[in-house]
Each structure stands twice: as structure tokens, then as C-alpha cells.
Image (spheres, rainbow, N blue to C red):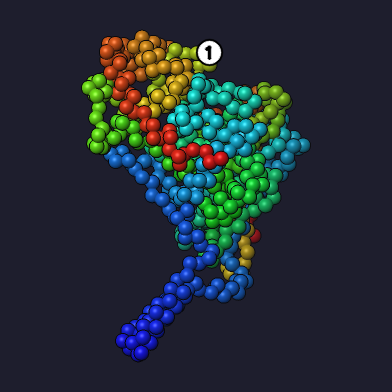
Amino acid sequence: MKYSIYALLALFLINIGCRKKDDPVTQTPVTTIPQINIIFKNTVDNKPLGLNNTKYQNANGDTFTVSSYQYYISNISLFKDDGSEYKESDSYHLINESSATSKQLTIKNIPTGDYVKIRFLIGVDSLRNVSGAQTGALDPINGMFWTWNTGYIMARMEGSSPQAGIYPNNLGFHIGGFEGPNNVLRWVTLQLPSKAIVTNSNNTSIYINSNLAEWFKTPLTINFSNISSITSSSYGAKMIADNYADMFSIDHVE
Amino acid sequence: MKRLFSISVFALMVLLTFFYACKPDPQLDFTTKTAPISFPIPQGWPKPFYNFENNTLTSSGFELGRKLFYDQRLSRDNTISCGSCHQQFAGFAQADHAVSHGVDDKLGVRNSPALFNMNWHTSFFWDGGVNHIESQPINPIKNPVEMDESIDNIIVKLNADATYRSMFKSAFGDETINSQRIFKALAQFMGMLVSSNSKYDKYKRSEAGITMTTQELNGYDIYKSKCSNCHTEPLFTDYSFKSNGLPLTVIKDSGRAHITLNPADLYKFKIPSLRNLKYTGPYMHDGRFNTLDEVLNHYATGISASSNPDAQLAGGIQLTTQQRADLIAFLNTLNDEEFIKDERFKEVK
């Protein structure tokens, strides 16, 4: 009997052990976290992009203004000089010209080291286009989603041009399509002109220019009197994607 | 006395053990409402295309989805719910409507498809434009001739309702209402709409007391030789896209080609299931036929070369009067009365 009491006591003590644990002690915040900032600056050739009032010329000589400009950047990888790759997890960002915060990304907890190359996808990878309801940057509430033909609008510009045939001279380029011959997903790989050095105390920023003029320049020069609107996955969308595939360049690293 | 003391100590220990040990954490709800439910796959059916991956099926999630499905606040003027055009008594199609009827009495160009066995669908809508059950609801919600509402507005409306806030908490752990949660909850309700209790199903499962008549069995043979290539068992569709040669109307609905931009897909539509035909008329992508006789007349003599008909329909499907009666008798064994009366799928008022 005595033993069974001891046994029960032991059981009791063990079971006390599975009571809810106290909240973990709040940890002292780390003073520095190794991170890289990626800052996008939208331009039209060498002029900064200004919405609505600023007039630009495309490579064809057509005058145009821009009222909105948005694009997805996803699957960001940073490469060190030793060739090792750091992939940002859940890497989906919607860059929106009219939102200053959207143009400044921070990649936190990146391993320290010297980074020499960045790679990312313009658009949202095909997997997330076929995986049902998403949230955050990929929430369809952001207006970058085709409802009737599932898929993200990878990049979108709207504006106007006197050359555009659509009343009242609207430009609307909604570039999407993640599969088949008209897939618009384009990888971008950029060598950094100087190393982005990440340490526990150094906050490095990579400044990237996105040149909207490239949408209409090469390899196919767009004449707004011929093409002023693209709103579905199509050969036209693919042509624009071929054009804008080289619109990114590193401005500087600091 | 010593023995009594021992027993008392023993009892006290047991009591203390229960009292202190492993009390439910008050922040977690261990009721069955939030416990995961495994999705029942009917005997003999293939694996579903969607099995609630990244969307844990629970009673709470299902009930939230049901409430959303029947909520008119999902439309701009609070008049149209999903259930308006997908009525349970009509096999979740819309009775007596050739085409869908949305806000401001606007009419669509296509027939509301019946909703059942959705988890086996590899695409949604007559043209297959939507690739995932969770991406389906946003299409009618934003369509100007259906519900014409923005997701932002829906979230505002739902947030104003304490019942919803608590239902979202029960389903997803906190009161946050966002588009992802709305669509996942709707997918839980729609995915659970499984129709597998027709006479045919029970016959296939060799259930006691279920026999097919000679006429039904003759009809089954006719179905197998004339219909089963496209309307494949056990779902009674292979979910592919084909044109069945319906003469073009003034609308000239391009069907699947609208999505693929491929001229070879012109006038093709997703093959609908032959289940629950008793409830789901009118038939075809534009609801042009009211009866199965009209449908079979079309297959016999109505195939039009103008609408890119499938090669298998060359010469039409010719049936004698007797064969036609037998086939219809078989098709009637595919009606699932239990499904359209299932209490779980009814609107909770």
C-alpha cells in the first residue's frame, strides 16, 4: 500500500509538470539584426516617375502621363561573393508608386557577409497562382488579380496619351499570365556595382531603378495609336513582359 | 482504520491529479467545433482534386461558410446571396432560370451551374477560367451582373456584425476578417456538398434492398455505350471541355476559348455531371433546354457544324423510343434526394 501511495505521489508530481507553462520571459530585444534594405525608385528613362501631371515620351515619340504604376516582386534571392544564396521566405511584395512604404523592402535576419548579386521574379510565381486564397501582398483586395481567369496581374500601368485610341485617351496595360506560351513571368538577375556588406551593426541598402519607359521600348517599340490597352493574358501581354524584362538596374549600394 | 486512511489518501491523490494535471488551456477551445474533420470520400470514388489542403476543415469553418453562402450582404445592394442562384432544392443550380439573375435584375449569359462534388472539379465555371475552389467566390462577387460587390465592402459589412466576428474567431482563432478567411470558409461549405446517395450509388455499393429495374439496367447499358466517354463514372463527367454542337445564338459565347484564346477551344464548355438532373434544369451552358427530351432531341438531330462539335458527336446520338425511355429511367437513378434535403446544407435562419 505504501508503495502505491509513493507511486501515486510520483504520478501526481509528474502530472503537475504538464500544467500550463508560465509565459516565457520576455527576451531582451536584440539591438541589431542583420538586414538588407531594398529600395525601388520608379523612373521614366532618367526622370523620376511623377503621377498624373508629368508628361513623358515613349520610344515611339508618343506623349503620355502615368496615373498608377504597380508591380509584383517575388522570390528574392541574395548571393554572397562565395556563391551562397539566401532566399527570402514567403517573398511576395507589391510595389506601388503611390505608396512610399511599398517601395522600401527590408529583408531581416539575413546571414552576415558580402553580397554581390540579387535575383527576383517580376510577378507572382505560377504556384501561388493556382493555390487558392492568399493574403498579404497577394490578397486580391489589392486589385492585382483577375477573377474570371484566375491569376495575378504581375505588373500594371495606367495613364493617358493623346495617341491612344480609347476614349478618353486611356492607357491601360495589365500584364499577367503565368503559363503557356504567353507566360509573362520574368527573372531578373543584377550584379551589384559594389558589395552590400551585411554585419550585425551595418544597415545596407540596395537602390534599384525601375524604368517604366522600357515597357514600350525594346525589343518591340509600342505605338500607342496601335496598342493602348492590354487586360488579359495574351500575346500582347507577353510582348510587354519581354520589353520590361530589362527595366531594372542597380542605382547604387550604400 | 489504516486501510480507510490509505483509501482516502488514494482518493485525494486521484482527485488532485485530475484537478491540477493537464487542465485545458483556457485560450484553446477543445470542443468538437474546432476539431479537424476528415473529408469523407465516397466508396469507389477517385481521390478528390482538393482535399482542404492549407484549409483545415472544421465544423466552425463549415458553419461560417454556410452562413456566408446564404448571406445577401455579399452583394452590392444586399439582395443576392450565393444561395440565390444556387438553391439546394435545385441541386444548388437555379430553378427555372436559363441564365443567372443578379443585382438590379441584371441577367448573365450562362446558366448557374449545379454545385455538388466540387472537390473533384479541376476548374470552375463553364469555361474553366478559375483554377481553385478558394478562388471561385470572388468571380460572382465582383461580376457586375451577378453580385457586383467589392471585397473591402463585404469585410466592412461583416465586421459590423458581432455574430460574424465570433464565428471567424471560432473558425480561424481570432476575429480578423479578411478575404482569405472568407474564401476558405466558403470552400469548406462548398467542398462538403457531396452528392453520393442516389439509387445508383447505393446499387453500386450493394446496399440492402436496392435493386435496379430491367429498364434502368438497359438504360445503364445505353449510357455506357453512348454517354460515358464524356460523362464518366462515378462523377458522371471527366471535367474536360467539349462542344456538343449547340447552334450558336446571337451571344456567340466563345466558351473555353475566352480563357485559352485558342481557336480550337471555341464554343467548348465544361462537361456537366449527369447527377441530379431531376433538380438542375434548365440544361446546357445557357439553359436553353427545359427537359431531358429536348436535350436528347438535340443530340439526335440538332448538332450544328457551326459550333465546333466534338468528333464523337458526328451523326448525333440516335436512340429508339424505347432506348430513350430506358436511358431516362437510368438517369433518374442518379438523382440524390437525400442530398437536396440534407439538413446540414440548409440556410440557418
Disc 1 secondary structure class: loop
For image coordinates 41% across by 17% down, the residue present is B291
Q: B256 or B168: which is nearer to us?
A: B168
Whole-percent x, y for residue B206 in the image: 23, 36
Q: Residues within 10 Å of mark 1 (few under 14, many from 20)?
A: few
- Can I make out residue B65 in this image? yes
* Horizontal relation, residue B10 to residue A172: left or right: left
Name the chain letter of the residue that bears numbered label 1.
B
Going by the picture, which residue comes out furthest to the front? B1
- Can I make out residue B231 in this image? no
Q: B180 or B344: which is nearer to us?
A: B344
Amino acid type, residue under disc 1 in the picture = Val
* Horizontal relation, residue B309 to residue B25: left or right: left
For image coordinates 30% across by 16% down, the residue present is B325
Going by the picture, which residue comes out furthest to the top? B301
Q: Quadrant of residue B118?
A: top left
Above or below, A83 against B245 in this view is below
Whole-percent x, y for residue B102 in the image: 59, 27
The residue to which callout 1 is attached is B250
For image coordinates 50% across by 16% down, the residue present is B252
For image coordinates 43% across by 76% down, the residue present is B15
Quadrant containing the C terminus of chain A in the rendered view: bottom right
Whole-percent x, y for residue B104 in the image: 64, 25
Going by the picture, which residue comes out furthest to the bottom? B2
Above or below, B221 against A70 in this view is above
Quadrant containing the N terminus of chain A in the rendered view: bottom left
Q: Total of numbered circles in the picture? A: 1
Whole-percent x, y for residue B174 in the image: 57, 56
Q: B102 or A240: which is nearer to us?
A: B102
